[in-house]
Image (cartoon, rainbow, N blue to C red):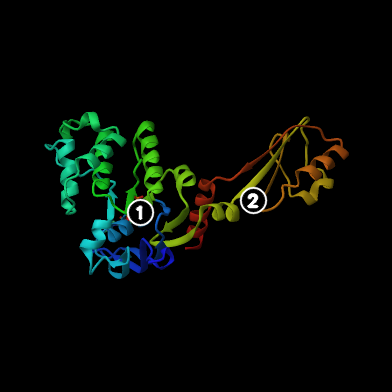
Amino acid sequence: MQPSQRPPAVSIQGLTKHYANGFQALKGVDLDIQRGEIFALLGPNGAGKTTMISIVCGLVTPSGGRVTVGGFDTARDYRATRSLIGLVPQELTTDAFETVWATVNFSRGLFGKPPDAALVEQVLRDLTLWDKRHEKMMALSGGMKRRVMIAKALSHEPEILFLDEPTAGVDVELRRDMWEMVRKLRERGVTIILTTHYIEEAEEMADRIGVIRQGQLIVVQEKKALMKQLGKKQLTVELEHPLEALPAELAEWNLVLKPGGHTLQREFLAGEGSGVAPLLRRLGELGIGYTDVNTRQSSLEDIFVSLVHEEGARA
Ligand SMILES: Nc1ncnc2c1ncn2[C@@H]1O[C@H](COP(=O)(O)OP(=O)(O)OP(=O)(O)O)[C@@H](O)[C@H]1O
């Protein structure tokens, strides 16, 4: 089959979820995730991220809509879809009395894969767990337990890996190891779907970003395009002497004089020019001296906050 003819890694159509108490956690989500993509799902607490992931992984039953994984229907071909997926859930779920080695090997067996000691050794080494392989789960620290959860998810060589807030509450070292691992997996063509509250992680790692709010996907876009389209830049000029008010000659520049009179600021879209050269020339003509000039680009976090805020105001 040509790559273009292969079905998406995950295809979600018209997905809805009403919980038993009547709460509607998903309100018609449509989304295709391509093979080999790193897709970051962002959203405030309670937006529906875990619900969506749990449905794709076959852990929660949808109320409506259809989900396919690697072309297989998650409802009809549950075993096929489940074997393609590795899930690192938010909650730690392991047997306290088992060793690390047994836990990870057992997990591989659950998916019907034959034992492969070399592969499990590699996974444990990659996650700095090799020295702990004989330890019982209950003797491990929280961070180490989380590493085991990741090792479990990787033990059956999934084509699609879900990471549900993988680095919430973990130390810097584990976070670094995680991202190293994600990079390696991506090189092997594994599709990675992650939810995170650390927006800088999505900014660094993701190819595409989806923003979910109150059960609806409000944005799905290439990260670069999103940042270009919605990102703002800010030009700041620090003045040599404070101004009491913005001179009328500068009215056309959309400048703001900050309290104290020492700083001029101008916001513009990332796609526009800053106009810094003509502005500085104009300041020179007006005899206004400056000590520093800088531009700052808004981060994905700024964009995320404004998106969620904006939609919230509209809802
Ligand atoms: N079993 C359940 N019964 C009723 N409501 C539920 C159930 N599970 C989740 N919810 C509700 O559905 C909404 C979405 O929850 P979900 O866990 O999917 O959000 P999330 O985006 O993953 O949030 P967080 O970032 O806090 O993990 C929340 O309002 C939650 O309270």
Residue 119 shows up from this direction? yes
Q: Quadrant of ligand 1?
A: bottom left
Q: Is residue 110 left or right of residue 247?
A: left
- Name the quadrant containing residue 137: top left
| Residue 65: percent from left, percent from top | 32, 71
Estimate the spatial distance between the alpha carbons at disc 1 and disc 2, rounded to whole Å: 31 Å
Residue occupying image coordinates x 38% and y 43%: 184
| Residue 24: percent from left, percent from top | 32, 64
Indicate which disc residue 46 carries. 1
What amino acid is found at the position of numbered circle 2 in the picture? Ala
Mark 1 residue's CB less than 8 Å from ligand 1: yes
- Name the quadrant containing residue 129: top left
What amino acid is found at the position of numbered circle 1 in the picture? Gly
Label 2 neighbour load within 10 Å: few <14, some 14-19, many 20+: some
Residue occupying image coordinates x 24% and y 64%: 61
Indicate which disc residue 279 carries. none
Q: Nearer the viewer, residue 280 or 159?
A: 159
**The residue tagged with tag 2: helix, strand or loop?**
loop
Identify the mark nearer the N-term, 1 or 2.
1
Label 1 neighbour load within 10 Å: few <14, some 14-19, many 20+: few
| Residue 100: percent from left, percent from top | 18, 36
**The residue tagged with tag 1: helix, strand or loop?**
loop
Residue occupying image coordinates x 47% and y 60%: 220
Disc 2 designates what residue? 270
Mark 2 residue's CB less than 8 Å from ligand 1: no
Residue 141 shows up from this direction? no
